[in-house]
Image (cartoon, rainbow, N blue to C red):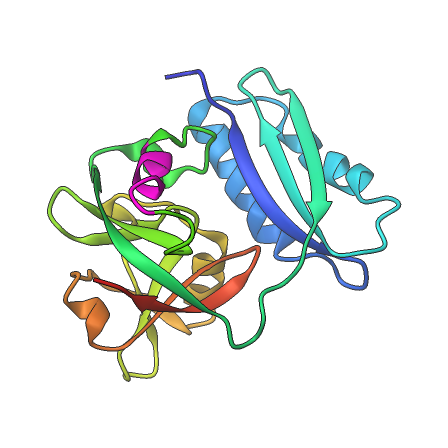
Amino acid sequence: MTDFSLIETLRYEPDAGFVRLRLHLARLKRSARRLGFSGVNQAQAELQKAVEDATVPLRIRLTLDRQGAIAVTTAAFTPLAADAVWRVRLADTRLSSEDKLLRVKTTRRGIYETARAEYPATEVEEVLLLNEKGEVCEGTITTIFLDDGSGTLKTPPIACGLLAGVLRTELICQRRARVARLSPDDLARGQLYVGNSLRGLIRAKLGV
């Protein structure tokens, strides 16, 4: 497949700059090299150009197509309340652990949109997906983390069929999270979190 672009979604804070910029650029460069996309070395300059006059927190969306064309869009960003709890549900839609493109953040979003459409936006904030083996993978826009009381968050391995999330990478490098295969039953045995680089960790409650 060639009809997709690579994508990174970042948060920009006027006082601190881009949040986790190094990890975002590293992932983008790895993906571009793996898939043969050109133009990736211009990404940081385009990001900086987009925030030259920024005075408020922003959500930044960068896309890079196979020919090297970069597009950057910005929108005002409002963080969640510190005590926010997202309602989440499991989708019937399944991911394939054999689909290597799931490990790359792209605009190929069809399967996630299908899963999200299984529940009204008024009922849930996020929908979680399993793979064909029934293993927990990821949310439609988040990585899944489980606090089972061991002191280290558990998060599914990439081999299950999921994105190498930037927040996930950071928490693993900080030894605040470790890789572990999870079943749906496991999610009820501890405190569930979902998260991404834009919003950080979010407490979640799994509905039935």
The x and y percentages for residue 166 are: 49, 53
Q: Place residue 111 in its image quadrant.
A: top left
Quick check: can you spot residue 192? yes
- Residue 70 among those drawn in magenta: no
Q: Is residue 206 above or below residue 30?
A: below
Q: Which residues are magenta?
A: 111-119
Horizontally, residue 53 falls left or right of residue 29, namely: right
Q: Is residue 183 above or below residue 6?
A: below
45 or 153, which is in the foreground? 153
The x and y percentages for residue 83 are: 52, 77
Horizontally, residue 35 falls left or right of residue 100, namely: right
For the point 29% across and 42% down, the residue is 118
Q: Place residue 104 in its image quadrant.
A: top left
Quick check: can you spot residue 157? no
User: In which quadrant will I find the C terminus?
Assistant: bottom left
The x and y percentages for residue 66 are: 53, 18
For the point 43% across and 48% down, the residue is 141
Residue closest to the far right: 53
Report the label total.
0
For the point 51% across and 43% down, the residue is 27
- Residue 114 among those drawn in magenta: yes
